[in-house]
Amino acid sequence: MDQIIIGQILELEDQNQVCIHFVERPSLIVPKKDLGNFKIGEFILCKLFENRKHNMRVKKVYTFKKTQIGKIVFEQKESFVEINHKEGKTRIPCKPFPNLYEGAKVRFRLENQTNAIIYTILEQEKEDTEIIDLAERMGLPTIFPKKVIKQASMLKEPTRIERSRFNLTNQEIFTIDGRDSKDFDDAISLREENGNYILGTHIADVGYYVKEGSPLDLEARKRGMTAYFLNCVIPMLPESLSNGICSLKEHVYRYTLTHEMKISKSGEILDAACFLACIESKKRMTYEDTNLVLNGQSVEGYRPFKDTLQEMYRLAEKLYAQRMREGAIEFNQSDPEFVLDQNGKMIDIYPRKRGKSEFIIQEFMLASNRSVASMLHKEGLIYPHRIHLEPDFIKLKSLEPKLNSLGVSIEPIWSAQNQSLAFNFILEQYRSHRNYPLIADLLISCMRRAKYTTDDLGHFGLGLPRNVHFTSPIRRYPDLVVHRIIHDHYLQQKPQTEDEIEDLELLSFESTRAEKRIVRCEEQVIARKSKEYLLSHIGETMDAVVKDCTEKGILIELKNCIEDWILNDQIEGTYHDGHYTFANSSLLCQLGTHLKVKLVKQNHLPDVSFQIVESNMAKTYHLKSRKKMF
């Protein structure tokens, strides 16, 4: 009978074998190739089994990290730490620990003392441990090393204005962020001068504190960027920096790398410059309250900024119109908003509405990024571009019959000189179509993901010849690197070396890989929480729309963005290839068909499925896309 047991991997003189030491059973010598990736000295959860020759063999199930997250469980007056893995769950006996309760999430470490494998509980976890555990399993660092925390604790807030910095503390500068945000890495200002706008984006000067090659810098580079998973944040920098001395809080001195742009009344960027500055944010605004002000309502503390905010919105509209003329693509899709209770359980999902304040920040940051890219290009500098390549036209061609079945012709794309403008033309043409969200979703699926590279390849989605990430150095490592390039090679005019350029190429690859890892983890988190949400709505009838029809069945999407398949054997119908329809005696499903579906639980399984109740062709609503392309 197979057994799952914990052991420790020990080294042997034979370089092709290792010893796995167990407690209360004989150790085993196994070939290294049987264990895959591992490190000498680490603990392993493995399955023991007998082969045909009745010899004991080992199959690796799980290798423990330096620290591990588990759940406290009690059984027959004994306490255990329970961990999840691909083969199920395993419990490790543990001694009673003060103030622990059934279900408490703890971080622990395994140790080998006096020929016994024991655990040490380090702390009780406060964050959503399910998300933290998933992130660690997918390779995301979640704990800062002691030397990083020590270095961060030694950094102090600015108390004076350095001579090398412009004093902007008397200017009307403020931040606009989400209500729950704490890492404010960008502030904005606007004034008029000689008939033009002077738009300032004041970005936290993270490079002043995080020196290249320091423990803080190396850890930030390894993480790549801050990961935001619903109610859980895994920061790129320790909170004493990200939420503290680097965060542009109101009424305190903060060092910034400021970028000022001279913009015409029509929204054209005429000139720009970067310089070191010290600011004092006059107001910490929220998107929610700023939207109320921009819509004519009164909010306490916002009255002195009302006229500036209105002018900012007018400028944002001009910047947006300029982007559209140059070929930026506007899908007009919203991301879902996930609402969780205090225990991290998902209780609602709804489309996030973008207001005027979000629109302002989007346009100002895009303008700043494109302007910095142009500035660096004119200086002949190499930097990590944020590129977005042309769509996958082979995939688009394969989807053309589906789009045709919805009454959509994409012929203008094939003959257009500017294909991004052609995309916009099609999107605008079908904006009022009842299945526009599905049309936009199909076109989005052909888009490639943006990435970092030192190659100057442009940004298709934004319609730009070049683009850079500059405005978020607290939460994106490439932005921090761009700040260093500006400081060393734009402001101080130092020449770039071959070694620096080679490292920028490696950095771009690392940052793209880190972003992909975070996106994969985010998708897993959303899938888990969505399933959790559905399990609490068993038996309910919901509105859905058909997103795809294949021989497998039909793919539906609910109003709240959750997707699932209704399989062929559940429908008992016939699939008509080429027409993308699924039919039986009482039902005809095709792309865009609106349905009423009932959520049911599968017998003896922790899964749910949908049953079609009726077709509802008259009802319409918008699908929402959560694909982040740019």
Image (tube, rainbow, N blue to C red):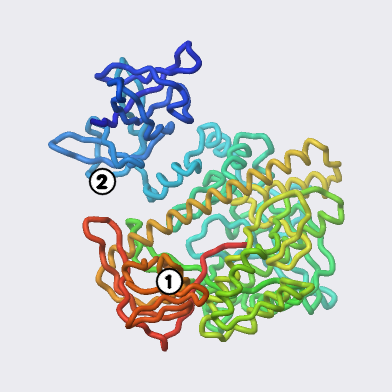
Furthest residue in direction top, as rendered: 13
Quadrant housing the N terminus: top left
- Nearer-the-camera pick, 587 or 118: 587
Q: Please, what is the three-letter code of the amino acid marked with disc 2? A: Gly
Q: CA distance from mark 2 to mark 1?
A: 34 Å
Q: Is residue 223 visible?
A: yes
Q: Is residue 301 left or right of residue 268?
A: left
Q: Is residue 560 visible?
A: no
* Disc 2 secondary structure class: loop
Q: Please, what is the three-letter code of the amino acid marked with disc 1? A: Glu
Q: Is residue 363 above or below residue 434?
A: above
- Nearer-the-camera pick, 357 or 521: 521
Quadrant housing the C terminus: bottom right
User: Pointer 1: residues within 10 angstroms few (<14), some, or many (20+)?
Assistant: many
x, y (%) of residue 393? 67, 65
Count of numbered labels shown in the rendering: 2
x, y (%) of residue 207? 68, 45
* Residue at figure coordinates x 53%, y 68% from the top left: 286
Q: Is residue 527 left or right of residue 235?
A: left
* Disc 1 secondary structure class: strand
Task: Identify residue for label 1.
Answer: 557
x, y (%) of residue 265? 79, 79
Please state which of the two labelled residues, at mark 2 or mark 1, is closer to the viewer: 1
Task: Identify residue for label 2.
Answer: 103
Furthest residue in direction left, as rendered: 76
Query: Residue 603 falls in which quadrant of the image?
Result: bottom left
On residue 282, the disc is none
x, y (%) of residue 454? 75, 49
Kindly indicate whether the residue at mark 1 contacts the one at mark 2 (C-beta within 8 angstroms): no
* Residue at figure coordinates x 32%, y 56% from the top left: 343
- Nearer-the-camera pick, 279 or 427: 427
